[in-house]
Amino acid sequence: MPSLPTLPKRPWQHHVTLALALAALAVAGLMLFDQMDWLDLAATGQAKNSGWRYLLGAGSALLALTVLLMLMFGRGVSTWLAPGVALLGLGELIARKGSPLDLWVFQFMQGQSLDLPEAMPPFAALALVLGGAAMSLHLLSGPRAWRSLVVALAGSMLAAVGGATLVGHALGQQVTAGWGMAVALAPAAGAVVLTLGTLLLALAANEHADAGRGAPAWLPVPFVASAAALTVVLWAGLRERELFYLGDNARVTIADLRAAISLELQQQTGALDQLARSWGEKGLPPLAARDFDAERHLAAAPGGRTLALVRPDYITDDWFFPRAGNEALLSFDHAKDPARLLTFRLAAAGGHAVMSPVLALADSSPGFIICAPVPATREIRRRQDPARPPRIVALTANALQSDRDQSAAVGMDGFITKPVKLEEIAAAIRRLFPPVETP
């Protein structure tokens, strides 16, 4: 009895490749029809209002379909699908701001227009170019060993990139998922690229098995590529954390330095204010005592260079310390510099020391000044003519009773608070200069 014809026996690599082609087709379909939200497509800040994810799903589905048709029916029509996938990826690489095809696909899939399409992540577009080009070369006639090597190299690179991308997202390393690009590879896109890479590796193994040889020469390539990609992931992650740590330490150091400088300036401002009040309440000390106070003040003020008295017309008085090297201060007109003039006026209006912004000093070097008003009431009282004592009225924004008591203690005859009212000024004048009755 004659035996029935049987189908040729296929190696197990063929069945594995067929299963992976179906799996890749299913994953690409999920990407194409927007069913991969469970992988958090927007984890890298990529909004879902873009058409590139549909193109990536469509290109991946065409690539998987190419492998499937080739396994089932031979080359035939599959020869024309692979170059289309490569051209699709190449077009997305060229149109970095989003191609017109992105707009059309998004409008077709979502039923709405899109003004500013997002560009496909570079590594996703490269995956389509690399996969399509490798399959195009594989479908050409040539030695099986050469064809399987090309497909194995492409599959190793895609699997390494896709797997490392997923690892990077799992470890929370966005810099790794982006591979140094401005647009990162989303988790769903990484899964698609990993699936395509695995499919190409299985196809290369199946091609080698059909040749009937032993272990393929390219067998170490996937492991080397994966190890290299994971090394990049770990290095980039450690580098990112190192930079964050260094940046954080730098911020803390800068904040500490800023606080220390601010505290030192506050102390210097307070010390000068106290010295000015002491000279105002007790009267200007003799020249020798004045030099002694100035030397002691500058010794306790890091960065302090000169101490000088300035007249009400903003001209430096004859006294300043030290005199050596500061001859430029003699009769120096502070009113010529708007920043200096404003500092003097703020100090006089507020009744306390005020620090200026950075300005040019008398010797033209950059720096700043601290102005502290010297209360002049005691000095005026000390020099006044007993027969004709002047009348002094305090005009200030400080309205506490302690301020009134302090004004009276230094010899002032009246006290008016801001904002000034004409009625209060008139009342103060009437108190100080009562009308004199004439016979």
Image (cartoon, rainbow, N blue to C red):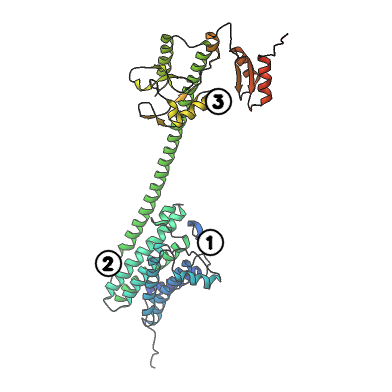
In depth, the one of 343 and 204 nearer the eye is: 343
Cβ–Cβ under 8 Å for marks 2 and 1: no
Q: Residues within 10 Å of mark 1 (few under 14, many from 20)?
A: few
Which sits in the foreground, 337 or 403?
337
Percent coordinates x, y for residue 278 in the rendering: 51, 14
Determine whether label 3 and label 1 are within 8 Å by CB.
Answer: no
Residue labelled with disc 3: 349
Q: Mark 3 and mark 1: span between their CA atoms? A: 66 Å
Tell me where residue 181 sits by quadrant: bottom left
In the figure, residue 436 lies in which quadrant? top right
Per the image, the residue denoted by label 2 is 217
Between 127 and 438, the residue placed more toward the observer is 438
Residues at marks 3 and 2, CA–CA distance in whole angstroms: 88 Å
User: Considering the numbered disc 2 on the image, is that residue within a helix, a strand or a loop?
Assistant: loop
Residue 109 position, x and y percent, is: 53, 71
In terms of secondary structure, where does tag 1 sit? helix
Q: Is residue 10 above or below residue 224?
A: below
Query: On the image, numbered disc 1 is attached to which residue?
Result: 38
Type of amino acid at the residue the image marks with label 1: Trp
How many other residues sit within 10 Å of disc 2, few (<14), some (14-19) or many (≥20)? few
Mark found first going from the N terminus, 3 or 1: 1
Is residue 199 something one can see in this rendering?
Answer: no
Residue extending furthest top?
Answer: 387
In x, y percent, where is residue 183?
43, 58
| Location of residue 281 with respect to 225 vertically, above or below | above
Is 395 situated left or right of 313 in this image?
right
In the depicted structure, whether residue 140 falls above or below residue 28: below
Q: Hey, which residue is sitting farthest right in the picture?
A: 439
